Each structure stands twice: as C-alpha cells, then as structure tokens.
Amino acid sequence: MPHETDVLVVGGGATGTGIARDLALRGVDTTLVERGGIGSGTSGRSHGLLHSGARYAEADRVGAEECLQENDILRDIAGACIRDTGGLFVQLEGDDPDYFEAKRAACEDIGIPTETLDGDEASELVPNLSEATVRAMTVPDAVIYPSRLCAANAADTRDRGATIHTHAPVENIRRDDGTVTGVEVGGSVDDTVAADYVVNATGAWAGELAGMAGLDVEMQPNRGVMVSVEYDGLDPVLNRCRDPDDGDIVVPHGGEVVLGTTSIDVDDPDDYETDRTEVERTRSECGAMLPPVEDAPEIRTWWGVRPLYAPDEQARGGRGISRGFFLLDHAEDGVENMASIVGGKLTTYRQMAAAAADLACERLGVDAESTTADERLPHVEDPERLDAVVAEFDGQGPTDEDIVGAG
C-alpha cells in the first residue's frame, strides 16, 4: 500500500525543511523526501552570509526589509546556527562614492542600523584591510551555518511526528486529470506516496520535478564559486560597496574565510562546467579589500547553484537587484493540489516556508497560523548535539565543514 500523508514536501534544503517544520507545528501530517542528505543542494553550498538587508537596500526596499526582519528572527530562534559577526561595506579608491551614499541613505530609510567609518577607523576594526579603503559602513550582517540550520529544522519536524526520508529521489508523479494522485519515490523509500497536497521545494531542480507532473516551471540555474582560504582574525563580514560583482564578499569562519562569488547561468544544475579562472578572479577581487587572502593557502573550493526563477530574471535584466521568492499555485495551471516555491535567499527561508505552508493549509482547510518566528529551533544551545543531528541526517555541506563537528 502507498504511504499516505496530508502534505508531501519534496526537497530537504532550508526551505523544504522549514516548510515541513511549519506544517508539523500546525498539526498537519507531513512527509518530506530529499534525494540526498538534508541540505545537500543549494542550501549547503552557499557562502553562509546572513543578510542584514543592506546589500539590497537601494535596489529593492521590500527585499531588504524582508532580510532585516528575518535576520532578527533567526538571531532569536537559531542559536548556534548563527554567528553574530557584524558586517562592513567597504568603499575602495575608484569605487563610486555616490553608490556608497545611496546605500547608506537607503539603509537609514529602511531602519538598517549603520555607522560610517573613515579609512583609519575601518583599518582599526579590520587589521590588514586594504590601504585603498576610503571609508566603510557597519551593518548587522552575520554568518549562518546551513548544515546546522537545515538539520535543526528537520529534527524538530521529525520530533513533532512528521516523516523525513533522506536519499529518496522522486522518480515519477502520477496525475489523474487535475490532481496529483501519487508520487513515486525511489531510494530509501521505494514506494508511492499518496498526499492530499504536494509542495515542490527543490530549488534549482524545481523545473524538473514540476515537469514530472506535466507542469512548466521555468528555472534559470546560476552557478557561483566559493573559496575557503586560511586566514585568522577577521571579525565582520566584508562586502565591497559597489554594484554587485564577482568577488565582493568575504565571510569569516574562525581560522578561515570564505570568498565569494561569481554568477554564471548554467543549463543543468547537476551537470555544468567549472572554470578555475572564477576561483582566481574571486581571490583577486576579494584581495582588493583584504590583500592577504589573495595568496592565502586554499582549503577547499565548491560551487553552488542558485535557484533563480527565469521569468523574474528576464524581467529584471540580470544581476544587481534583490532576488525575491515566488510561490506558484499550480491550481492556476490545472493541478489543484500542488505548488512550487522558487527563488529567494537562505536568509529568507523561514518566510518562504511560512508562505508555502499557508497555501497548503488553506487548500486543506486547516485553520492554524505559522508560529516559526517564535518557536526556537531544537538543540541550538548545544552545538555538539546539533552537530550529531547533522550527521544523523547526512547533512554536512562544504560551507561550514570547518565549524560543524569541529568542537
């Protein structure tokens, strides 16, 4: 007999585990399937920056406000999944001073707290900062450890009675007219799941999963490289204060820093070429802010694939504007009991999850609101226990492998 559930969530990244947790908190019988380990897709292959909203302030007020709100919430509920570092936007000689002023003014208007430092003050805060630093602006950025975050969400979901299956790829979706009647899952499940509602939270792979149901979700996967190098003593996240470009973020990790990133469209999120010149360019550009990192010993390098929604990419015309999320209700496409959630950022995963869970509950007639903004994640005051949960869900990604389990 097929496994029966109220909601099937496909995808075990931050958004998928967040959706499953949100539903479980509302008392909805939920099953999550993930083709690999928890967080093994985009979430676990990011640069790990918890945005304050400042990166988007002058280009997308709404997106910046979302980041600021979620930044505050995650600091409250996520414990050891977050490291409060602060952040710095750095203007170098040759960078447009008007861009700095526009960002500072936009942050002030939105309510993102900032302080402007001259070059000497910035260098006191960050030893080895480039001598070409004209000025800098402090912002409440932080570091997020995605392996811990995804595992904590999954653990709470399971502990509240939901079912989590890792290494369980979806192989087919059965439809009868306008309804999904069964989802065939391989791997550790090797069975059919019959769900009243299906949520596609597979990120860059959302188009492939939707296609199994005869739906068209047009994604534009986009790769970016991250490089972790040896460097001890950096406190705040460094952001280059210019139009977003390659190599403009440096994220501190104890005795390492993560340098990022590039932005190149790919056709297939599972099969794409990588180019060593991206690594060298990222190191060079980040080295313009913090010179020692350009030649620092390389520890590990990885690429992640952003889950960009193609119609939005085409409409906005490329890099530089905040990438929001989109909740696609497939009832509008003739499939009554399925939705896809695409786009977005790791920082706003909880908000994305709440939106998807709201829609599922509306369709199921469940009268319950999201409480994830107030419910603290489990084990987040005990890093060792939390890291054991990461291992249990096979959730270790390259972003934070120097932190998770290191203590």
Image (cartoon, grey):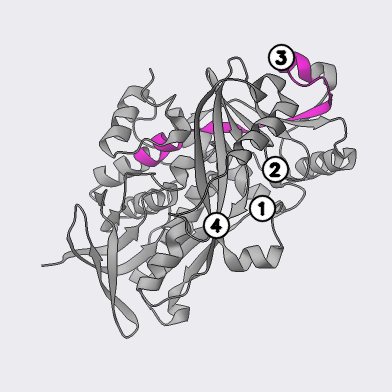
Mark sitting earlier along the chain (4/2)? 2
Q: Do the CB atoms of the residues marked 1 and 2 lie less than 8 Å apart?
A: yes
Task: Measure how far apart labels 1 and 3 are at the Cα level.
Answer: 31 Å
Q: Secondary structure at mark 2?
A: helix
Is residue 291 one of those drawn in magenta?
no
Please rate how many residues cluster around mark 2, counting C-alpha atoms within 10 Å: few if below 14, some from 14 to 19, many from 20. many
Q: Which mark is residue 55?
A: 2
Q: Nearer the viewer, mark 1 or mark 4?
A: 4
Which amino acid lies under the numbered mark 2 shown in the image of this protein? Arg
From the top left corner, tell me how far across and down residue 353 is, in percent.
45, 54
Name the one closer to the observer, 33 or 337. 33
> What's the CA distance linking mark 3 and mark 4?
38 Å
Query: At which x and y percent is residue 394?
Result: 30, 38
Residue at 78 percent across and 41 percent down: it is 242
Q: Is residue 300 left or right of residue 196?
A: right
Q: Earlier in the sequence, mark 1 or mark 3?
A: 3
Above or below 91: residue 267: below
65, above or below 3, in the image = above
Q: Which residues are magenta?
A: 122-151
Q: Judge the density around disc 3: few (<14), some (14-19), many (≥20) Cα neighbours within 10 Å.
A: few
Q: Quadrant of the N terminus?
A: bottom left
Which amino acid type is shown beneath numbered disc 3? Pro
Callout 1–callout 4 Cβ contact below 8 Å: no
As drawn, the label of residue 322 is 1
